[in-house]
Amino acid sequence: MKELYIAIKMKKILLIIITFLFTQKTFANQPNEWQLGFQKAASESMREIVAFHNNLLLPIIIAISVFVLFLMLYACIKFRASANPNPSKRTHNVTVEVLWTLIPCLILIVMAVPSFKILYKQDSIPKADLTIKAIGYQWYWGYEYPDENIIFDSYMVEEKDLQENQPRLLAVDNEVVVPVNKVVKVLITANDVLHAWALPSFGVKRDAVPGRINETWFKAEKVGTYYGQCSELCGIKHAFMPIAVKVVSEEDYQEWLLEAKEKFAMEEIKKDYTIKLAKN
């Protein structure tokens, strides 16, 4: 009976672990508690970054760490005071000095070649299907669709106003909406201080600099909502200006365009009317 009880317990524990690892929440496109590693990639650029990290950087880092640990243990044991009552007077070794200079250089070259390819691909913007302008303010984001004459602001939803399935500190009142499998060019700037527009699932991060426009791009491969945050320390409310991009089908995107043109046009009229009243 005892063995049967233990077996049942082990099955339950295994089921809990499997459920935790493979639930949608674990692989959501937003930060999770106790998360290790990157968010799930939703673009080719991010997949290349993750592959570069997992297939090249991690093995190199682990190998170096193990080697240095071995040297430390070897030195502590081999050259301990009890085993060497008369310490060596040697001050240098030409062979060792040449090796510890050349080997790191070779490692850096091995790392540099694929990393330069990824950086070049990110900086080389293909022909865009859609252009968006992101403007950083203290402390929220403003967005423009220049080709559609749509302008709106995106504020974080306060915790007391959160609805079901809206993540704390990440949900916004007006999300950026883009079609799936389309090249989206993003023009990034700031109105006051330095900000940074970052979306981990797309492998995108660019500084927003006042008086300057930086460019980046992404091509979302999956429908869903993807979250990011300002990644440049910009003031007291730096942690409260999230980024939310909703990726939808082409049909849903066209429907959103029609609604957005009417919705944000009315908000602009209300804003202008409020400003005029305040001046009077």
Image (cartoon, rainbow, N blue to C red):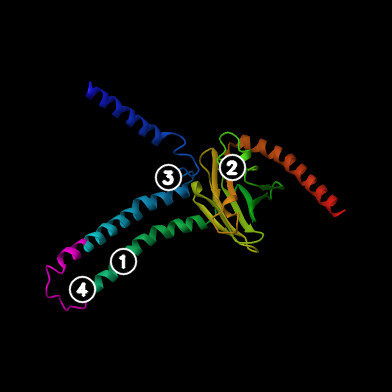
CA separation in Å, label 3 and label 1? 31 Å
Q: Give the residue type at disc 1.
A: Pro
Q: Residue furthest top?
A: 1
Q: Give the labeled residue for mark 1.
A: 104
Question: Who comes first in sequence, dot 4 or dot 2?
Answer: 4
Looking at the picture, how far across and down is residue 108, in whole percent? 35, 64
Among the 4 quarters of the image, the one containing residue 192 = bottom right
Distance (Cα) linking label 4 and label 1: 15 Å
* Residue type at the position of mark 3: Gln
**In the orientation shown, which residue stands out farthest toward the right?**
280
Q: Which mark is residue 171?
A: 2
Amino acid at dot 2:
Ala
* Marks 4, 2: nearer the viewer: 2
Q: Mark 3 points at which residue?
A: 35
What's the CA distance linking mark 3 and mark 2?
A: 19 Å
Residue 166, numbered label: none
Disc 4 to disc 2: CB gap under 8 Å: no
Q: Is residue 276 above or below residue 110?
A: above
Spatial CA distance of label 4 from label 2 is: 58 Å
Quick one: quadrant of the N terminus? top left
Mark 4 or mark 1, earlier in chain = 4
Helix, strand or loop for disc 2: loop
Earlier in the chain: of badge 3 and badge 1, it is 3
Nearest the eye: 248 or 227: 227
Tell me the crowding category of disc 2: few under 14, some 14 to 19, or many 20 or more residues within 10 angstroms, Cα based.
Answer: many
Q: Determine contact: label 4, label 3, CB under 8 Å.
A: no
Is residue 83 shown in magenta?
yes
| Left or right placement of residue 74 versus residue 251 in this view | left
Numbered range of the magenta stretch: 73-93
Among the 4 quarters of the image, the one containing residue 79: bottom left
Residue at 28 percent across and 66 percent down: it is 103
